[in-house]
Image (cartoon, grey):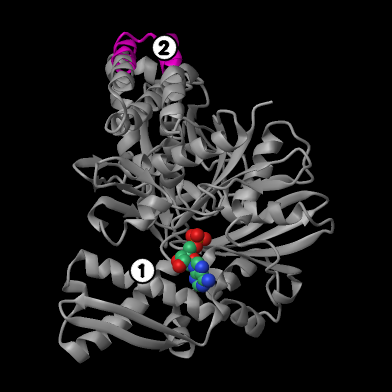
Amino acid sequence: MEMIVGIDLGTTNSEIAILRGDGKAEVIPVEGEFIMPSCVGLDPAGKLIVGHTARNQMVSHPENTILSIKRRMGENTTVTLGNMSMSPEEISSFILAKLKSEAGKHLECPITRAVITVPAYFDDAQRKATRDAGALAGLEVLRIINEPTAAALAYEAGHEENQRILVYDLGGGTFDVSLVIVENGVVEVKASHGDTHLGGDDFDRLLIDHVTRIFNEKHGIHLMNSGLRAVNRLWVALEKAKRTLSDRPFAVIKEEFISGDHHLDMEISRDDYEEMIRPLLRKTMDAVHACLKDALLLPKAIDKIILVGGATRTPLVSRMFEEEIGIEPHHEINPDLIVAMGAAIQGAAIGGVKTKSILVDITPYTFGTRVIAEHEGMFTDNFFVPVIKRNSPLPISKEEIFYTHLDNQEQILVEIYQGEAPLASDNIFIGDFWIKGLSKAGAGNPILLNLELDVNGILKVTAKEKITGLSKTVTMDTTKAGVATNLEEKFRNISALLEGAKTQDDEVLHQPTDAADKNTLISRAKGLRKRAEAMKIGINEEDAAELSHLLEQSRQAIAGQEWEAVEKLNESLADMLFYLED
Ligand code: AMP
């Protein structure tokens, strides 16, 4: 049976794991280490490098190295790598492709299917971007699961009792906390809170501010204006000092000639460092209390606290828990590896392996629609009605009835928002669509609105005129700002070109699954093409010619809508890249 791997695609580091035959999760080493930096770069010869090699050149070639791309996932943006401009999902796909290829080598079989984890607080667009990154790397992403959920799953695999677990996950760039109930082998997330822009990187930034201020006072030079190389040297040194402070009361930072003839030579105490980061950790503890409140639990009702993510090694994290909750967090499973292990357990379960736990996930968001209604004594067309409430178990399908406002109303605009505020405009706009051709009924014509959120947090919206059954279903694929992710927009443009203009009737749809399949094929072909193009430099002429030939055939097959051929060519390209990347 083909392995389904579990991948923790982290901001700073990423890991890949499988469930072994004996039921134990095993993290697969990448170049001899279990943790691979989530770093992508171009080496001086222009060859794509990923992981440790890319991280090692961060200081010498910062302009050709990208770190923390996870923070940009879901944004409609591009980053520059050499002379290429790429989307965050394309950069992430290189990280995933590297993990995939290393696991393939280690297990001696190609890897094509995966479960990938994301922070519980990732929104729809960020989850989609993660899935796209998987597709670009040639992975069928069977499930996107929340990182704290995966951690609880890995933890539960070694424990029998029923318990209430608080999973506190503080990584490089993101923070979330979840209350997970484990009962009779079912792992259920009851509540989640978090911040997608809070993590160990912010601690680095505080240290950088502190050190540059003192350096400036001493030398009259602002290190942040001393060039990218100096900034990166500083950051690498301070990140190391930060880790030292987890084990020692003092850390010494020495960087010779960091700016002209000036050296950096400084000592930082753990006490001073803790004062700097305390306000940020305070924010995380407030989220812990909010999470408990949502789960209707008092702190003393928690059985265990599990720490996840490298930044939880900061001693102040455990101390704050002891002071505020009175429980010492558990450290027995490596906080860097636990998430990938949980993902591997979930992957095996999807693949039919009997595991001890079943996963029940929740949505951390409320989704609803905008309607005309009375609000605080006034009529407004901006009233928000929740349909799916936050903390509902996934998958979930909820239906509500709404009514047309006018006589003979022939069309309605369905708008979907995410949030809790009573006014729609105070929430995050997710997407909208028109349903046209309603029967000419009087005002009050009932319209059923169904919101379906799948286990990956992807939202499908159906609006149906009750009396005629006229319906329209749309998968919400727009970001907070109402723009499609870069990649998805590209996919859709391509499929739109291929399929020609759609009629109104075509739009009254339950999305054809074959269109989704085509999109997957095209996205995979695009991902392979990108990897192949990055690969062409540095391989022998014969291989380069063979690659070009396959790429040209793939292009022609897509243009000719020969989907079977596209699929076969994808496989041939993936095989070839698998061996070339070896
Ligand atoms: P993750 O995203 O889980 O890989 O966590 C990475 C973050 O953990 C980075 O900000 C690291 O600097 C931080 N980190 C790793 N080890 C330590 C440590 N021993 N003490 C404090 N922070 C650490």
Q: Residues within 10 Å of mark 1 (few under 14, many from 20)?
A: some
Q: Which mark is residue 1?
A: none
The residue under the point 17% across, 72% down is: 226
Decide: is 569 above or below 85. above
Q: Nearer the viewer, residue 194 or 17?
A: 17
Q: Residues within 10 Å of mark 2 (few under 14, many from 20)?
A: some
Q: Give, as a three-letter code, the residue at label 2.
A: Trp
Point out the image quarter for the C terminus.
top left
Q: Is residue 561 magenta?
A: yes
Q: Secondary structure at mark 1?
A: helix
Please give the residue where the numbered disc 1 appears in the rendered image.
Answer: 236
Q: Secondary structure at mark 2?
A: helix
Answer with the quarter of the image where residue 227 lies: bottom left
| Magenta highlight range | 550-569
Q: Is residue 568 magenta?
A: yes
Left or right relative to 160: residue 230: left
Please give the residue where the numbered disc 2 appears in the rendered image.
Answer: 563
The residue under the point 53% across, 78% down is: 246
Answer with the quarter of the image where residue 78 lies: top left
Residue 380 in percent (x, y) is at 35, 52
Left or right relative to 195: residue 478: left
